[in-house]
Amino acid sequence: WQPQWTPGAKRLYANSSIGLFGALAVQPSGMSYEEAMTRRVLQPLKLAHTWITVPQSEQKNYAWGYREGKPVHVSPGQLDAEAYGVKSSVIDMARWVQANMDASHVQEKTLQQGIELAQSRYWRIGDMYQGLGWEMLNWPLKADSIINGSDSKVALAALPAVEVNPPAPAVKASWVHKTGSTGGFGSYVAFVPEKNLGIVMLANKSYPNPARVEAAWRILEKLQ
């Protein structure tokens, strides 16, 4: 294998990169990813219904996704816990969004710093800024810019990237968002810290990203 581009020249989305980042982030702790997430993120934020491994006592509440009409759960895979392994409830995810909109209320200072660093701007790809997982666009913005930008033809394309050096700190006037999909499930999270507005959308079927973004936009637009 040989790289197609000079390092730092292009941004190409890949679940494996998120998985690798998660694995490397917890490596100095000596803990597994699941243990580190539970002790350092989920418990401090009181996300009592969020797990990597759903406990037996909660299996009855573990939603089934649907793929080609058949019920499915998340399939195991390489770096699955780190890349797409979190199972949660809409209430816990709403708490997660609240913590990300205003980390000053997070009592654990290391976690507070981590939340803020994740929304720092490290790379610019067109109108979008890449954080640590999060994608940000300057607010206010037009709906078309995020709806069209979420289409797979754009979101999964290799696009020119410009490094932000030094990284810019989190900007309150931002549309911060991330889609998520596995076989049988589709999710979307978006929030605008300046407006203290956010939304979590969880579905037990995968559907196109632009439809998720447009629905979220219309809902948040009505709440302003």
Image (cartoon, helix red, strand yellow):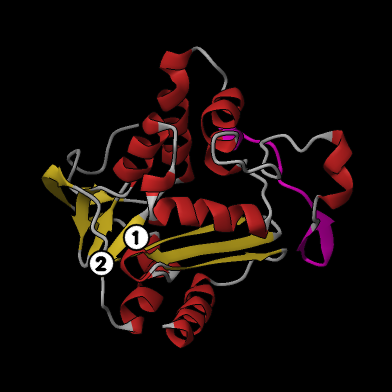
Res 133 seen here = no
Using the image as rendered, state which of residue 152 and residue 191 is in the foreground.
191
Secondary structure found at label 1: loop
Label 2 amino acid? Ala
Which quadrant: the N terminus? top left
Residue 197 placement (x, y as % from top left): 43, 70
The label number, if any, that marks residue 173 in the structure image: 2
Res 153 seen here = yes
For the residues marked 2 and 1, what is the alpha-carbon distance in whole angstroms?
26 Å
How crowded pointer 2 is (Cα within 10 Å; few <14, some 14-19, many 20+) is rated as: some
Residue 121 placement (x, y as % from top left): 22, 50
Which quadrant: the C terminus? bottom left
In magenta stretch: residue 6: no
For the point 37% across and 32% down, the residue is: 109
Q: Is residue 133 left or right of residue 139?
A: right
For the point 30% across and 41% down, the residue is: 117
Using the image as rendered, state which of residue 19 and residue 97 is in the foreground.
97
Q: Earlier in the sequence, mark 2 or mark 1?
A: 1
For the point 53% across and 74% down, the residue is: 212
The label number, if any, that marks residue 157 in the structure image: 1
Q: Is residue 125 left or right of residue 194?
A: left
* Location of residue 90 (image quadrant): bottom right
**Position above or below: 115 against 1:** below
The label number, if any, that marks residue 27 in the structure image: none
The stretch of residues the image draws in magenta is 65-81
Secondary structure found at label 2: loop
Label 1 amino acid? Ala
